[in-house]
Amino acid sequence: MPAQPLDGITVVALEQAVAAPFATRQLADLGARVIKVERPGRGDFARDYDRAVKGMSAYFVWVNRGKESVVLDVKDDADRALLDALLAAADVFVHNLAPGAVERLGLGAPVLRERHPRLITCAVSGYGPDGPYRDKKAYDLLVQCEAGLLSITGEPPAPARPGISIADIAGGMYAYSGILGALYERERTGAGTDLSVSLLDALGEWMGHPYFAQAYGGAPLARSGARHPSISPYGPYRCGDGTRVFLSVQSDREWIALCERVLRRPELIRDPRFADNPARHRHDEELTAELEGCFAEHTADGLAALLDGAGIANARLRDVAEFAAHPQLEARGRWREFDSPVGPLRGLLPPVEVAGRPAAMRPVPALGEHTEAVRAEFSR
């Protein structure tokens, strides 16, 4: 296999759950050697979240492909010596332990910076290294609550959790991109650096639109279900066969095309209720009635073809099984098999394609699978 972008980079990870493991799995997919340090007994508690993947946790399989699992008791002298040896050889140290845990272990950033000037450290936490919430336990849904996400998600009047671990993913992606930036900086300066990523800060960045809309627009975004909170038409619309097509009009040019080429109602272009997006959004119920009245003549497939022909973005609502058989992914060959303790599994290739370099989709590790090999390698 051709060299990967991060071949030769070693990452030591004291990690569990989702956020930090998601970040380090991205590094593994780019060729980094990721040594995952797990506690004796059950290891990363995400291994026990479920048994959906042939007895393994779907969460664990998702975010731990391509890593080496080493079981260490960091309070044992010999195991602690091995951890110190790993850190001395590492390029990156990632952790998301409970607040204060790495400091109590003598592995805080200032200590490691003095010992290993080239080391890049990355601490992933719920609420950041200081402030009144520093020691507060943080899990994905709870951070979503604190960030205001649930106040704008769902149907009135009830909030709804998004279907994925969005706070963890946000934090993991900022840790990943921060580490890449730090590696690039080290290439120029020779010096490592210390990174800190908070899930609240990460998700707060993703809350930029609702924040600015409320802070300067004077009113919070309302929960709008599957409809967009500030753009119309944008959401699901019922067709004549009883199914729904999702569509989005992002500009007045697209609105004109929709009226003329799909609705066959050019007079709507001049209707003051629909003159621009703010007007269309204020009159969204009336607009929906107009659209669904016209769409009643079409099946979902027929309407999608009309929308495509007019240059109007649209989609069909698929469930997860339908996504897994998506014709676009199949046509582009985006699925690959990778190994695991329970046999071959099928997963998507990493989103970033590096020209001429097949993705390094290495196996999911069994608990402690690499302990003895790593001990032999680093105890010489």
Image (cartoon, rainbow, N blue to C red):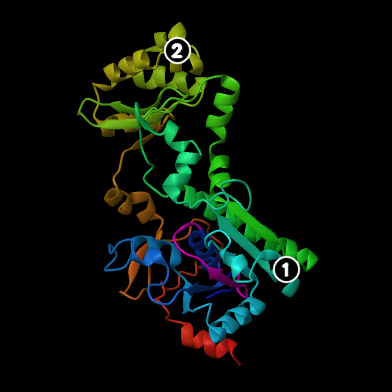
Residue holding disc 2: 274
Decide: marks 1, 2 in contact (CB < 8 A)? no
Side of 24 where 165 appears, left or right: left
217, 30: nearer the viewer: 217
Q: Nearer the viewer, mark 1 or mark 2?
A: 1
Q: Quadrant of residue 30?
A: bottom right
Residue at the location (28% across, 22% down)? 295
Residue 7 in the magenta stretch? The answer is yes
Q: Quadrant of the image for the C terminus?
A: bottom right
Residue at the location (27% across, 16% down)? 293
Upstream in sequence: badge 1 or badge 2: 1
Residue at the location (46% across, 37% down)? 149
Which residue of the protein is positioned furthest toward the right in this rendering?
189
Q: Up-down: is 374 above or below 94?
A: below
Q: Secondary structure at mark 1?
A: helix
Q: Position of residue 378 (x, y in %)?
A: 59, 87
Q: Quadrant of residue 249?
A: top left
Q: Position of residue 294 (x, y in %)?
A: 29, 18
- Tag 1: residue type? Arg
Q: Up-down: is 380 above or below 88?
A: below
215, 363: nearer the viewer: 215
* Res. 291 visible in picture: yes
Residue 331 in the magenta stretch? The answer is no
Side of 117 where 209 appears, left or right: left
Q: Which mark is residue 113?
A: 1
Which residue of the protein is positioned furthest toward the left in this rendering?
241
* Res. 61 visible in picture: no
Magenta-drawn segment: 6-19
Q: Position of residue 110 (x, y in %)?
A: 71, 65
- Tag 2: residue type? Phe
Residue at the location (57% across, 35% down)? 208
